[in-house]
Amino acid sequence: MHRLALVLLLLTGSVAYAQPVIYRAQSYTTGTDDRDRAAALARCVRDVLVQVSGDPALLKDSRVAGLTAEPETLVSDYVYLDRMTDVPHHDEQGSRDRPYDLIVRFDPLRIDAILARLGERPWPAQDRPTVDVRIMLTQGTDSGLLTADGVFDERQRRALLAAADKYGLHVVLPSGQGRVIPVGAGAVQLRGTLAWKPEAFGWAGEWRLASHGRERAWSIEGVSYDEAFRSALRGALQILSDHGEPR
């Protein structure tokens, strides 16, 4: 695929959230040369195996390293997005010293083959339900529901959507402006609270997911809100793909 077409596909998939996008992952790098690319690709492979299968245990599975020793052979295409696009180069800084997101599209057949060797199988995007998210945010004396169009919760909203993108889930947030945002039939409910806890030196999240007549609960604390949202969506992925209970 032409690089420009790939960028458009990646951006529209990330922004619209009309359906989950799988077989794609991204990682942070410094520069666009070979120094960080191998390590970034290795991280992306782990992420995409979890995303496609729904099994977070693959993040720490020792077998993965041996099966993905040459991650570049699993890649269909990739693109670098400059995190400082609107900031001019300064002093002696070159492109190799700037932060980038390496966004990688993987070959589905090759990823599926690795999953088969791990005893896993893909969870097709079309089989994944919409996740209806309701999370109450609390920081000091400020609190409110995380919304799709609120002003005070923009950074947290972006973090939640990034986590959903990472795990190949379609999420819907409520409107803070009174608009009706359709959820669709078959949606599952993810409910929770996210609060800043000074004594834990970070955020604490408590999550509940209702699916197939059962409700599961899990929690995390002492982390950034980015990691807290990853915990919420990673747990939802694990439950919905029938890979056990999050902890």
Image (cartoon, rainbow, N blue to C red):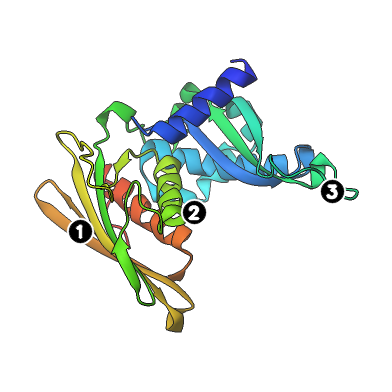
Mark 1 residue type: Arg
Among numbered discs 3 and 2, the one appearing first in the sequence: 2
Residue at the image point whose x is 47% and y is 30% from the top? 23
Quadrant, the N terminus: top right
Above or below, 134 relative to 65: below
Going by the numbered disc 3, the residue's amino acid type is His
Q: Earlier in the sequence, mark 3 or mark 1?
A: 3
Residue 170 percent across, percent down from the top left:
32, 38
Quadrant in the rendering for residue 26: top right
Q: Mark 2: which amino acid? A: Lys
Pointer 1 residue: 216
- Most extreme residue toward the bottom, as rendered? 199
Q: CA distance from mark 3 to mark 2?
A: 39 Å
Residue 179 sits in which quadrant?
top left
Q: Position of residue 242 (x, y in %)?
A: 25, 45
| Residue 211 position within the rendered picture, expressed as x and y whole percent measured from the top left | 16, 48
Residue bearing mark 3: 90
Disc 3/disc 1 C-alpha distance (Å)? 50 Å
Which quarter of the picture shows residue 102?
top right
Label 2, residues with CA under 10 Å away: few <14, some 14-19, many ≥20: few
For label 3, the SS is loop
Q: Is 238 on the left or on the right of 107, as rendered?
A: left
Whether residues under marks 2 and 1 lie with C-beta atoms below 8 angstroms apart, the answer is no
Q: Is residue 230 left or right of residue 86?
A: left
Give coordinates of residue 74: x percent, y percent.
58, 28
Q: Nearer the viewer, residue 125 or 186?
A: 186
Left or right of 50 on screen, residue 27: right
Mark 2, residue position? 60
Q: Give SS at disc 2.
A: loop
